[in-house]
Each structure stands twice: as C-alpha cells, then as structure tokens.
Image: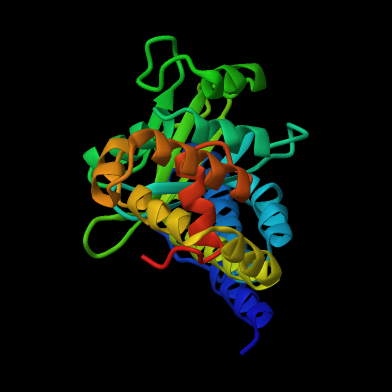
C-alpha cells in the first residue's frame, strides 16, 4: 500500500458517519461547529504524520515544518537539536519563514552556554513532558543574545519537547518559538503527539547530510593531528584544559593552543560546536 493510499484510507475512516446521542436543539449548532473543528484537526494531524514520512532531506524538513506543520503548532522559529553523550554535546539547526537567516538563532542557541542545558534540564525535571517557557526578564534562560533575538522576532514563548532513549538520555530536543500567549495545553499535547515523527524525519535529514559530506569528512579527519584527535576525545568526555594537560603530561597552555587549532580547522567557535561537528563528520567515534 502506498503512502498516498494510506492517507486517503485514514481520511475515509475519519469521514465515515458517526452515531452520537441526540442533543437538545439549542445545542445542535454549537456541537456541529465543535465536531467540524475536531474533524479538521484530526485530519490535519493525519496529513502531518503522512507528510513527515516523505522527509529525507533538509529542504523537505523545512517545507514540512514551515508549511503544513504550522496548522497544528503555529511558530515563528523551530530549533532542532541533537544531543550526544553525557554530559551532552549539542548540534542544532534553525527553521523559520519569518527571519531571513534562522541559522543565526541556532548559532546563538549553542553559543549561549545557559540555553540548551537549561531547557534540557527543565524537560528532564518534568519527567519528559512538554515545557512552556515565557521569556520574561526573570526567566531561567537569562538575558543573553539568544533571548534578545527572540524578543526582536516577537517570539516570547518557547515550547520544548524531545525524544529520549531507554535509559532516559535525551536524543533530540525541539524548541518552538511562538508569539506571546499562543501556547497552551493543546499545543503541548500536539508536541507530544508529533515528537516521534519530528525526530525520525530530522534523523533522516542528518543521514542524508552525512552521505553528501563524505568529502568534507575525509578532509577534516586528515587535517587534525594525532595529538589534536587525542585532545578532542578528552574534550568530548568533559575534561578541562588542566585535566587534559595532566593526562597527556603537557601544560594547560599547550592544550589551549591545540584547542584553538581544532576550532579553526573545524570552522567552529567553541568546544561544544567542535564536538557536534566532529560527531557529524565521524571524526569522533564514541
């Protein structure tokens, strides 16, 4: 059975007559409007789940999340984050139709060291239930560059939900940046419903990117020296420059110089991004 026929079958089932108890005449119009709204939402959910199966590249993911998915969770910006290791290293990408360069937000999301760990911790503390953040001056995210840019975008509420493995370790985290007072229990429920499909579609785009970046992977792996690869592995394990120096019997300053060379060679700005890119390019094999 094709995907198209599956979607059509689902719509036929949803469209079939439903026998309901008789209601007073005064309530019939209200109930009719409510039933129509419920049917449209259910159909939109089915169409979105079906569309997610067709995502295999970043462009497909962009078209889906900034098109059809907006009918369920209206957002100004979506940041998708992959989490690697413990403590986690993050790799993020941004999607938006309202800002010309959503990658700016994903870069700021990673550069502000408080943002991703704070959102992840809040999600874990809620036992992996969706979290809604109001980006007020007193919010736990602080007043860094990321939250200031969200304020300029007019997206002062964040809906955060993700996917975790059997041991409770986060695999992915999705952050919807939305207009003020636009989030509630309905959007939180839809985030729970859609998270597995978001994760599966997003992972497929990463596999496609890896296939397309084979040349870059080979080149990046070759430009790092053996010593730099050793230091990169210890960075992945959460060691400081001082600790790496003690392990490798070199000075912390020498370690710092190696770290700066690693950042330049990988074309990243901090250690977290270095880990994320090295995992993406399979320079690291944890």
**Residue lying at 46% horizontally and 62% vertically, measured from the top left:** 226
Colour logic = rainbow
Q: Position of residue 248 (x, y in %)?
A: 29, 51
**Residue lying at 54% horizontally and 53% vertically, measured from the top left:** 277
Q: Is residue 286 left or right of residue 35?
A: left
Residue extending farthest to the right is: 100
Pick the front one: 136 or 74: 136
Pick the front one: 262 or 281: 262
Q: Which quarter of the figure is the N terminus placed in? A: bottom right
Q: Position of residue 177 (x, y in %)?
A: 55, 32
**Residue lying at 47% horizontally and 14% vertically, measured from the top left:** 143
Q: Is residue 201 above or below residue 162?
A: below
Pick the front one: 10 or 228: 228
Q: Position of residue 285 (x, y in %)?
A: 41, 68
Quadrant in which residue 214 is drawn:
bottom right
Q: Is residue 279 above or below residue 175?
A: below
Residue extending farthest to the front is: 250
Q: Which quarter of the figure is the C terminus placed in? A: bottom left
Quadrant in which residue 221 is drawn:
bottom right
Q: Is residue 202 above or below residue 179?
A: below
Residue extending farthest to the top is: 137
Q: Is residue 124 above or below residue 105?
A: below
Q: Position of residue 133 (x, y in %)?
A: 41, 27
Quadrant in which residue 137 is drawn:
top left
């Amino acid at each position: 059975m094709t995907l198209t026929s599956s979607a059509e079958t689902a719509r036929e089932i949803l469209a079939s007559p439903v026998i309901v108890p008789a209601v007073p005449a005064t309530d019939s119009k209200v109930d009719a409007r409510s039933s129509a709204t419920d049917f449209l939402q259910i159909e939109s959910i089915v169409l979105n789940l079906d569309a997610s199966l067709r995502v295999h590249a970043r462009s497909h993911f962009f078209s889906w999340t900034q098109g059809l998915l907006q009918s369920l969770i209206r957002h100004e910006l979506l940041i998708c984050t992959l989490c690697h290791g413990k403590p986690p290293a993050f790799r993020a990408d941004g999607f938006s139709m309202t800002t010309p360069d959503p990658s700016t937000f994903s870069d700021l999301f990673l550069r502000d060291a408080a943002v991703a760990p704070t959102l992840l911790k809040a999600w874990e503390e809620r036992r992996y239930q969706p979290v809604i953040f109001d980006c007020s001056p007193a919010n736990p995210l602080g007043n860094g560059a990321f939250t200031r840019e969200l304020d300029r975008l007019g997206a002062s509420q964040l809906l955060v939900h993700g996917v975790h493995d059997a041991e409770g370790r986060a695999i992915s985290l999705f952050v919807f940046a939305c207009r003020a007072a636009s989030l509630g229990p309905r959007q939180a429920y839809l985030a729970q419903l859609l998270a597995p499909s978001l994760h599966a579609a997003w992972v497929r785009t990463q596999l496609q990117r890896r296939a397309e970046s084979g040349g870059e992977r080979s080149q990046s792996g070759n430009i790092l020296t053996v010593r730099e690869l050793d230091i990169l592995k210890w960075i992945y394990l959460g060691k400081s420059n001082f600790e790496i120096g003690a392990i490798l019997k070199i000075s912390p300053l020498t370690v710092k110089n190696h770290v700066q060379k690693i950042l330049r060679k990988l074309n990243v700005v901090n250690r977290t991004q270095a880990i994320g890119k090295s995992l993406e390019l399979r320079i690291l094999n944890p």
